[in-house]
């Protein structure tokens, strides 16, 4: 049995650089997971393959971060959210395209789509309103 | 099941504070808690009686550039050469240490074990402290995006408001109650009611606040992570706590009033918040509670009072639902109605909670059991719960990657 495979943190971010939102699909129970994992969260099997998520979904919840950690001190306030992707899985991302001074404009359930932002040296997952 | 019964025979803690301990480091803080713990043993105890140390310091590498804390604290307490081990589970570290201490005694290996935790947090600026504590979250999938601990609980709060049609106003009942309880606790960080703090600030800044809500809604109470404001968050505190555990056989030699550990529940949940199906409950808390209740052979209704993990105000509401004290969506309403006050049907966070007593991360778990110890022995003075027989602690690591529930009995 082969114990190594490519479903790594690095691979997820390498795909983000290519503007692709990649997770894995369990070939045994069809469970979809994002970010990618090495062992299926449902059936615990390791028979997985890469799965590309479309990037569209609905905002499940959000916050506006006012007191930020050192590396993002100059960025605050910024918006963060958890998005339920149309394929079913949830993922955290930065929320862009909405101003942070109007929290009442941010609606749970609103339709969003993935975007990819460049911040210092890395590409980050973001979502913007889908309209 | 434990092979042998284990009891608490002593408890000590420093006051939790942001300025009082300015000139102390972890070792001085822990020794202070340790000395009070030794003194609290009714019939006295000496160093040579203690067989092992399980200690927590969650992020001392960031705060003090110090690891190998177990050895350091064993050395400074004068307990060398006993075995000393550091236990880390983010904010739930020292309740995990207490659990391991119980196992070590129940196994028959040791008779007396010291457990506890210490965190010296004020060495860092707020942004650095925020970043240090984010090491307890999923680094690539949460931290890099800028998700902080308050950010995670803020997202749970917004999901909760949406699901149960409630609002931020409900959260203020938690901070107001916990400040009230802390005003009667000499170990608490804040020993004043929110209105007293508001009055002090208004005098200093020439402002006027008609009532608590007026103050809490003002820019004087700024947003940390919307919808959470400063007074929805536990403060940054330095502090330490320590508990002495003994086998039930040995316990009577040291005290006529041992406090027994009757229920232990400890579960792990997903590291990332987004990997939970629902964001309005912490599944690990529900499971840890059920395991602890089962072991203690009781139900949630039998708990006389509880210390729950209110690192942020929504966390207390969610905890009182996860532990089965109130139905889903009704935890906030219960707090508003006064049902969780010291004289209510289910007193919650009689010591002021993390919110007002303070939250020096690794000191929190055993500081919760310190309050349970005081309550069950009838030594909680003005905050004493009437007829306290069974107490519970609920300690959560980060957003719920760890949940620990422990039940204690007189």
Image (tube, rainbow, N blue to C red):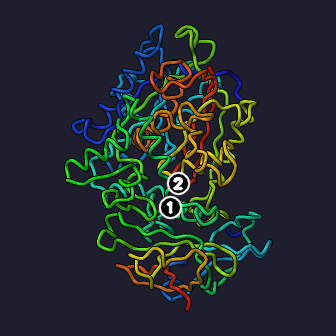
Which residue is at 49% across, 44% downward?
B88
Q: Quadrant of residue B360?
A: top left
Q: Position of residue B234 (x, y in %)?
A: 41, 48
| Residue situated in front as seen by the camera: A56 or A37 | A56
Which residue is at 60% across, 49% downward?
B333
The residue furthest front is: B210
Q: Which chain's residue wears label 1? A: B
Q: Residue at label 2?
A: B170
Q: Residue at label 1?
A: B152
Q: Quadrant of residue B101?
A: top right
Judged left or right of residue B409, residue B375 is left
> Considering only vertical position in the picture, is A93 above or below B369?
below
Judged left or right of residue B131, residue B292 is right
Q: Kindly state the secondary structure of the residue where label 1 is placed.
A: helix
> Considering only vertical position in the picture, is B4 above or below B358?
above
Q: Give the alpha-carbon distance from disc 2 to disc 1, as whole Å.
A: 18 Å
Which residue is at 47% across, 51% downward?
B172
Q: Position of residue B27 (x, y in %)?
A: 32, 33
Q: Quadrant of the C terminus of chain B?
A: top right
Asked whether the viewer can see residue B258, the reply is: yes
Q: Kindly state the secondary structure of the residue where label 2 is placed.
A: helix
The residue furthest bottom is: A131
Mark positioned earlier in the residue sequence (2 or 1): 1
Q: Quadrant of the N terminus of chain B?
A: top right
């Amino acid at each position: 049995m082969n114990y190594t495979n490519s479903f790594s943190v690095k691979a997820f971010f390498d795909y983000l650089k290519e503007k692709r939102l990649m997770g894995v699909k369990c070939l045994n129970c069809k469970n979809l997971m994002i970010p990618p994992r090495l062992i299926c969260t449902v059936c615990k099997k390791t028979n997985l393959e890469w799965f590309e998520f479309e990037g569209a979904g609905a905002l499940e919840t959000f916050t506006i971060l006012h007191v930020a950690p050192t590396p993002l001190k100059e960025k605050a306030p910024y918006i963060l959210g958890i998005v339920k992707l149309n394929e079913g899985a949830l993922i955290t991302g930065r929320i862009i395209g909405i101003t942070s001074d109007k929290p009442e404009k941010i609606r749970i359930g609103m339709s969003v789509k993935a975007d990819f932002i460049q911040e210092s040296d890395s590409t980050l997952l973001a979502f913007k309103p889908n309209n | 099941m434990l092979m042998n019964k284990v009891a608490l025979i002593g408890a000590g803690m420093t006051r939790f504070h942001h300025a009082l301990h300015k000139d102390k480091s972890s070792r001085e803080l822990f020794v202070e808690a340790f000395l009070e713990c030794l003194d609290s043993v009714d019939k006295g105890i000496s160093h040579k009686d203690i067989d092992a140390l399980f200690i927590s310091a969650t992020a001392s590498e960031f705060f003090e550039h110090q690891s190998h804390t177990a050895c350091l604290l064993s050395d400074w307490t004068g307990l060398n050469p006993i075995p000393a081990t550091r236990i880390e589970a983010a904010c739930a570290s020292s309740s995990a240490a207490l659990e391991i201490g119980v196992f070590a005694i129940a196994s028959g290996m040791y008779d007396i074990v010291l457990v506890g935790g210490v965190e010296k947090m004020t060495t860092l600026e707020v942004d650095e402290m925020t970043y240090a504590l984010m090491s307890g979250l999923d680094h690539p999938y949460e931290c890099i995006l800028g998700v902080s601990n308050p950010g995670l609980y803020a997202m749970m709060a917004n999901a909760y408001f949406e699901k149960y049609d409630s609002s931020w106003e409900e959260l203020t009942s938690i901070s107001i109650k916990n400040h009230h309880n802390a005003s009667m606790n000499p170990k608490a960080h804040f020993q004043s009611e929110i209105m007293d703090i508001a009055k002090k600030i208004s005098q200093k800044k020439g402002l006027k606040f008609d009532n608590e809500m007026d103050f809490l809604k003002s820019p004087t109470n700024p947003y940390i992570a919307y919808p959470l404001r400063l007074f929805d968050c536990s403060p940054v505190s330095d502090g330490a706590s320590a508990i002495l555990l003994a086998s039930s056989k040995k316990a009577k030699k040291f005290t006529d009033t041992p406090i027994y550990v009757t229920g232990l529940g400890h579960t792990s949940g997903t590291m990332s918040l987004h990997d939970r199906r629902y964001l309005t409950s912490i599944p690990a808390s529900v499971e840890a509670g059920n395991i602890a209740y089962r072991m203690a052979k009781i139900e949630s209704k039998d708990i006389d009072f509880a210390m729950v993990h209110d690192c942020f105000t929504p966390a207390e509401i969610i905890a009182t639902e996860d532990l089965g004290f109130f139905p889903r969506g009704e935890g906030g309403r219960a707090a508003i109605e006064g049902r969780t006050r010291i004289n209510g049907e289910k007193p919650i966070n009689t010591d002021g909670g993390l919110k007002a007593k303070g939250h020096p991360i690794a000191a929190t778990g055993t500081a919760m059991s310190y309050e349970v110890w005081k309550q069950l022995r009838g030594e909680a003075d003005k905050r004493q719960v009437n007829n306290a027989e069974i107490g519970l602690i609920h300690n959560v690591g980060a957003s719920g990657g760890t949940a620990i529930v422990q039940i204690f009995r007189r």
